[in-house]
Amino acid sequence: MTDDVIQSTQQETTTPVRVAAVVYNPIKVDLDELKAAVAAEQGAGWADTLWFETSEEDPGRGQTRAALEAGATMVIAAGGDGTVRVVAEAVHGSVASLALLPSGTGNLLARNLDLTLDDLEHSLHAAFSGTDRPVDVAMIDIRRADDSTSRHAYLVMAGLGLDATMLANTDDELKKKVGWLAYVSALVTAMRDKNQLHFRYSLDGKPARRTTAHTIIVGNCGSLPANILLLPEAAIDDGEFEMVILRPKGVIGWLQITGKIIWENGVLRRTEIGRKVTGLTKEVRALRYVKGRELVVKLERASDIELDGDSCGQAIAFKTWIEPGALRVRVPVGE
């Protein structure tokens, strides 16, 4: 055997084979179409793709762990925001990367990464032929009224108050039929809720402050559907989160919040001239923005809490922090 043949054989045996696993929500995807698209896109250097179906009892956490134990180096989350969140929770901190097949009404992480939506072939090409982008992961320990605790990850936002109450009141069947329009009636119900959040919070280990608010939102990134930029300075790879506290006083307060979020954040901040203009505008009492790395909140009574658009029960207290660059997401080359 010649030296060239020996060297070629050694290269073939030492070249690592990558393994993709698809964790999919059967309600959100057409499995036959997805399998055909994966087969067409998967190139040399990849082993046979592994397939794991989520269930109502396990929305993806156990399936992702099984995929990692089977040797997956890339886990493709095929489903809505809930599927993405639980898959990312299991993947983060491992040697595997996360790929996204956006599906559903929100696609929050994909939107914040400026990934193409509703294009299966493009998304799979980014998965199999793209590159890794390190992003931050937000972790949260939630304490319940019965003093039990649970730990979760989220990639976009955690919220208490208006948005969590709205999600808790959203009709799931209506959401399936009309998408984000289903939130409208739930939003009206939530805005009628006169209950306030009375809480103490400590940011980055500083002395605790006591305040009252209608809503608290902590964001690892800040964009929502309908081109709404809720948290203008939140970035998914800066090692920090941005928190907004909403404290409207009647109709005037809600108008101030709408002006800030829809006009200033959604329109002005998207241009260089607009950003200069926003620097001259006054802050309003109805909302307050702060940035940090660790936040501890203790509420006087339990309140609904949501993570990445999914209701997560009620919390009496929580601690949230950022793990910088703890997750690698597949994106197209050059982005």
Image (spheres, helix red, strand yellow):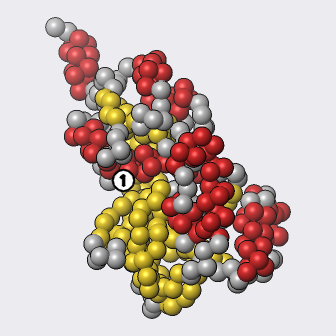
Taking the image as shown, residue 76 lies to the left or right of residue 261, namely: left
Q: Is mark 1 on a helix, strand or loop?
A: helix
**Is there any visible trace of residue 209 in the rendered image?**
yes
Task: Give the quarter of the image for residue 63.
Answer: top left
Q: Residue at x 69, y 79 (%)?
A: 248
Residue 217 in the image: above or below residue 63: below
Residue in the foreground of this view, choosing between 196 and 89: 196
**Is there any visible trace of residue 132 in the rendered image?**
no
Q: Which residue, as the protein is rendered here, is positioned at the far top?
A: 1
Taking the image as shown, residue 281 lies to the left or right of residue 303, namely: right
Taking the image as shown, residue 323 lies to the left or right of residue 120, namely: left
Q: Which residue, as the protein is rendered here, is positioned at the far left?
A: 1
Q: Which residue is drawn at 52% across and 56% down?
A: 309
Across and down, in percent, residue 229 comes to 67, 60
Residue 66 in the image: above or below residue 313: above
Across and down, in percent, residue 60 comes to 34, 44
Badge 1: residue crowd in 10 Å (few <14, some 14–19, many ≥20): many
Across and down, in percent, residue 290 comes to 58, 77
Position of the N terminus, as image quadrant, is: top left
Residue in the foreground of this view, choosing between 303 and 192: 192
Task: Give the quarter of the image for residue 202.
Answer: bottom left
Residue 130 in the image: above or below residue 214: above
Position of the C terminus, as image quadrant, is: top right
Q: For the residue marked with disc 1, what is the amino acid?
A: Glu
Q: Which residue is drawn at 78% across and 69% down?
A: 259
Q: Name the residue under label 1.
A: 89
Taking the image as shown, residue 71 lies to the left or right of residue 91, namely: left
Across and down, in percent, residue 25 comes to 41, 37
Q: Which residue is drawn at 40% across and 73% down?
A: 315
